[in-house]
Image (spheres, grey):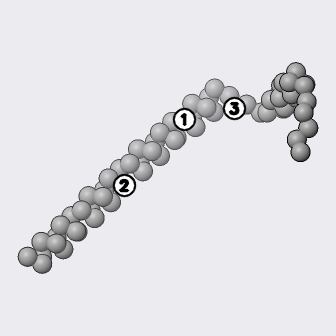
Amino acid sequence: MASKSNPLVFLRQVRSETAKVTWPSRRETVISTVMVLVMVVFAALFFFAADQLIGWILSYVLQAGN
């Protein structure tokens, strides 16, 4: 069973724990964001190419039967 505590005590504990966190610098955040966006573009291009290739193969196979 969870123990009930004072909300003020909880907020003090939360503040204490967040003070221990090593927050990234602005530069690190920008670099990470740019890296994520670049990887999203690469993944989108890859899946677009794979979809086009699979569609071309399927249309070739389905038309070959006619």
Residue behind mark 1: 33
Q: Quadrant of residue 58?
A: bottom left
| Quarter of the image that includes the C terminus | bottom left
Query: Between residues 64 and 36, which one lies in front from this camera angle?
Result: 64
Q: SS for tag 2? A: helix
| Circle 2 Cα neighbour tier, 10 Å, few/some/many (<14 / 14–19 / ≥20) | few
Q: Which residue is mark 2?
A: 47
Q: Nearer the viewer, residue 35 or 52?
A: 52
Q: Amino acid at mark 1?
A: Thr
Q: What is the x, y in percent for residue 41?
A: 41, 44
Q: Quadrant of residue 4?
A: top right
Q: Amino acid at mark 3?
A: Pro
- Relative to 13, 43 lies left or right: left
Residue designated by label 3:
24
- Residue at the farthest front position: 1
The front one of 30 and 1 is 1
Tell me which amino acid carries mark 2: Phe
Q: Classify mark 3: helix, strand or loop.
A: loop
